[in-house]
Image: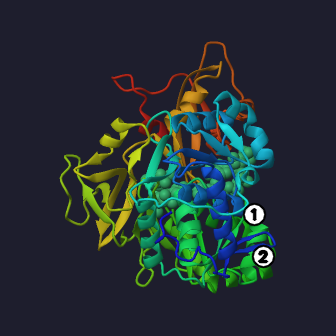
Amino acid sequence: MTTESFPHLRAGNDNIALVEGDTTYTYDTVNERIDRFATGLLGDKADLQEERIAFFIPASLDYVTVMHGVWRAGGIAVPLNVASAVAELDHYLTCASVTRMVANGEYQESLRELCAELNIELVSVDDVIAESAGQLPEIDVDRRAMMLFTSGTTNKPKGVVSTHKTIRAQITTLIDAWSWTSDDVIPLFLPLHHIHGIINILSCGLWAGATVHLFAKFDIPKITAQIQAGTYNVFMAVPTIYVKLLQYFDTIPEEEVKKICAGFTAMRLNISGSAACPVKLFNQWQELTDQVLLERYGMTEIGMGLSNPYDGERRAGYVGQPLPGVEAQLFDESDSPINEEGKPGEIRIKGDNVFLEYWDNEKATTESFKDGWFCTGDVAVIEEGYFRIMGRSSVDIIKSGGYKLSALEIEGVLLTHEAIAEVAVIGVEDDTWGEAVVAVIGLKDGASLDYNDLKNWCDGKMSAYKIPKQIKIVDALPRNAMGKVTKPKLKELL
Ligand code: MCA
Ligand code: AMP
């Protein structure tokens, strides 16, 4: 990135940046490795000129090396979900016109066929890394830096492009608002193809000069052992993770629960976000740990937009107020701003934190902005100065365990099953997942369908977390006079 970015990621800084298992890496080491990787990526070129470089790497030193290496060499980083089904990767790679893919070991093996088919050069980190660092380009902050895929109200996920400036704005507002310092130590166990893991934890941590402990997945025993030991002072997670911790506490001796909770109590900050934190969960967490969860609201296209205060009242069921540098305004259905409290409207956002464009999709980009405001599709109300999220304008978006899923995308896959004549996918309220994916299915004449068979069939066709948790077979889907499936009616039915 540009020289003013990530001030701690520089030569001579011997503070610990990353911890991976028993190995620690200083900022100096990470910085030097990034420079060598960027040099290797460049080869004979002076600048990658926004070449799309994808990577399929779990949380690790290599992940950080590739992400920052692509940035420093002038490319666009396309981090992919290592839990994706190959069929989904095909779309991401084609949509982004990816030319090079970085993956190691078994991950590389799993991609060999697909990359060959798509004519994408498949390399490992070691293949690329140069012996020593060479000259790197100066990158203007308005250049494109990263592309993340987001599900929406269309069949296929769209590539959300942010610039170096967008990323800087998304990070620095959180550094300010949540008082990050180089003394912070945080565990990172969220997937690294979304803002929550990439920006809020990894990038804020590295920007602040803090220490980030990397976990390939949410490994409860390993992570809680560190929490008991008092290793961390900041913890950020989706509501489902807090639910899973509570469920875990029911399975272990009370003494151990007390020690883990004491570890949480000693922290300076516990944050919940990516999906609504139920008031009951907020209260349970406070009772057990004395921590008042700080809930905030964000989106792939904007990073974080609203947050409860670090100092001041953190109100259960509310997402707080606009972050520094972010403008948020509610609008009614005729696009007029709502300035009175208690009246719901769509949240629209302005600021340097807002993304540049949907990749190669001018229509979707244009349609998502009105008068310079990005339209989130989330409906909220302001009560005593705090925003409260009421829901979304589309029933076709489901939030399961913090992942945003497109009902239409899942329906598109299910419709290719030989027994299925029609299907409607909906999100049904669920204590663990927030919303659970349920498929309501009409079968072809004479066909039958067993849930476990369908689940196995879905394997490899969609990421595991998208697979319906339940199916319901109906004679016919309820439709309105226009022939459109009435999903709100279906939701009520379930
Ligand atoms: C796992 N499973 C799920 C989900 N995750 N099912 C539905 N929804 C999910 N989110 C299923 C698996 O398919 C598997 O099913 C079973 O649960 C166990 O899988 P496992 O991987 O072991 O589960 P886990 O490790 O406990 O994962 C739960 C999780 C994970 C840690 C909560 O879902 C997660 O990391 N979610 C966070 C995603 C995230 O970072 N979202 C932020 C994006 P089976 O047993 O049947 O095979 S939103 C964002 O970035 C915005 C900007 C924001 O505001 O933050
Ligand atoms: P994504 O685009 O995957 O990053 O998901 C963003 C969406 O997550 C938002 O548009 C909201 O619908 C939802 N979201 C994020 N944070 C919260 C929150 N604290 N409460 C309710 N919904 C949230």
Chosen colour scheme: rainbow
Name the residue: 63% across, 51% down. 41
The spot of residue 400 in percent (x, y) is 57, 50
Left or right: where 89 falls relative to 165: right
Q: Which amino acid does label 1 sit on?
A: Asp
Q: Between residues 233 and 398, which one lies in front from this camera angle?
A: 233
Left or right: where 400 falls relative to 258: left
Specify the quadrant of the image occupied by residue 140.
bottom left
Q: Residue at label 1?
A: 219
Name the residue: 51% across, 54% down. 74
Left or right: where 22 falls relative to 193: right
Task: Inspect this view and state whether residue 250 appears.
Answer: no
Say if 157 sits above or below 6 in the image.
above
Name the residue: 32% across, 56% down. 347
Q: Which amino acid does label 2 sit on?
A: Ala
Q: Between residues 427 and 131, which one lies in front from this camera angle?
A: 131
Task: Inspect this view and state whether residue 260 appears.
Answer: yes
Say if 302 sits above or below 318 in the image.
above
Q: Residue at label 2?
A: 225
The spot of residue 207 in percent (x, y) is 53, 73
The spot of residue 43 in percent (x, y) is 63, 49
